[in-house]
Image: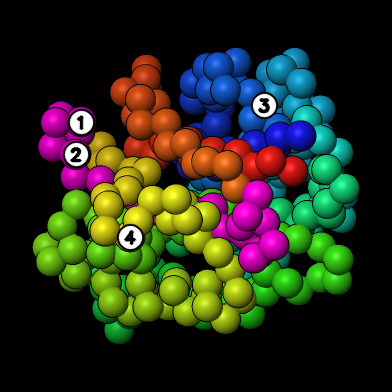
Amino acid sequence: MGFSITTWNINSVRLRMPIVEQLVLKHRPDILCLQETKVTNDLFPAAPLRAMGYNHIIIHGQKGYHGVAIASRIPLAEDHRQDYCGVGDARHISAIFEHGNRRVRLHNFYVPAGGDEPDRTINPKFGHKLDFIEEMKLLKANGEANTSAILVGDLNIAPLEHDVWSHKQLLKIVSHTPVETEGLLEVMKRGAWLDLMRQHVPENEKLYTWWSYRAKDWEAADRGRRLDHIWSSSDLGPHLKRIEILKEARGWDRPSDHVPVTAHFDF
């Protein structure tokens, strides 16, 4: 029995519903997690998703900013929205699903980008990001009895040397500064999370999920970063079959600057 889950920062779900439909019709993941939906709950475009078989949808939206959603072919239960940093941003949602005799808690995150200047004394957005990561250190992969866990989302940090096109040149660029990368690795360590994207791709190989809109020819330049992640509790690691990064989606009509990432399991 197989199972697949896709995570994608869609950068406005209403604007980009055509490419969401393109993804689903071609790849048909069991669960689709979206970030940066940029829409209130009442205006979320659920109808097209239901028409494609995603009858179980939970959303945590916000007008014009942030927003996360889970659309599933599998029933979802016990949904929860955590207000990280207590500022009211729609950046987290979680739910329980059952598949292959497993009970799984799924977390969908949109971590703050952090602005341009990596100094919290002059850039409150960067301070907010660091505080958000600090709170994430409390999240445990084995935090619920008899329940596996999967964490996905745009975490806005490329933690490893080869998660960026140039480690040396990006050390002072937000998303790859040491305070961020060390913080995210500590989230993984304290919570006993597995980095599934690196399970089958060695750490010395380049791996990207995001290419800037600012690049005139993003594909030729290939100056990417791995900002999108899929983690799990240790018991699911042996059940990972493969990870797919749909790089071609960056070249679709009116694309997001992020591309879909899909994990395929054998449970």
Of the numbered discs 4 and 1, the one sitting upstream in the chain is 4
Pick the residue in front: 164 or 113. Answer: 164
Whether pointer 4 and pointer 1 mark residues with C-beta atoms closer than 8 Å, the reply is no
Position of residue 51 measured from the top left corner of the image (x, y, whole percent): 75, 15
Q: Amino acid at mark 2?
A: Asp
Q: Is residue 180 visible?
A: yes
What residue is shown with label 1? 219
Whether pointer 3 and pointer 4 mark residues with C-beta atoms closer than 8 Å, the reply is no
Whether pointer 1 and pointer 2 mark residues with C-beta atoms closer than 8 Å, the reply is yes
Judged by depth in the image, the label closer to the viewer, 4 or 2, is 4
Disc 2 residue crowd, few under 14, some 14–19, many 20+, Cα 10 Å: some
Q: Which residues are magenta?
A: 214-239
Up-down: is 145 above or below 28?
below
Pick the residue in front: 122 or 182. Answer: 182
| Image quarter of the N terminus | top right
Of the numbered discs 3 and 2, the one sitting upstream in the chain is 3
Pick the residue in front: 101 or 214. Answer: 101
What residue appears at the point 71 percent right and 54 percent down from the top-left corner?
106
Give the color scheme: rainbow, by chain, secondary structure or one colour.
rainbow
What residue is shown with label 3? 45
Q: Is residue 68 visible?
A: no
What residue appears at the point 55 percent right and 17 percent down from the top-left corner?
26
What residue is shown with label 2? 222
Disc 1 secondary structure class: helix
Q: Amino acid at mark 1?
A: Glu
Q: CA distance from mark 1 to mark 2?
A: 5 Å
Position of residue 105 measured from the top left corner of the image (x, y, whole percent): 76, 57
Q: CA distance from mark 3 to mark 4?
A: 38 Å
Disc 3 secondary structure class: loop
Magenta highlight on residue 218: yes
Q: Amino acid at mark 4?
A: Glu
Judged by depth in the image, the label closer to the viewer, 3 or 1, is 1
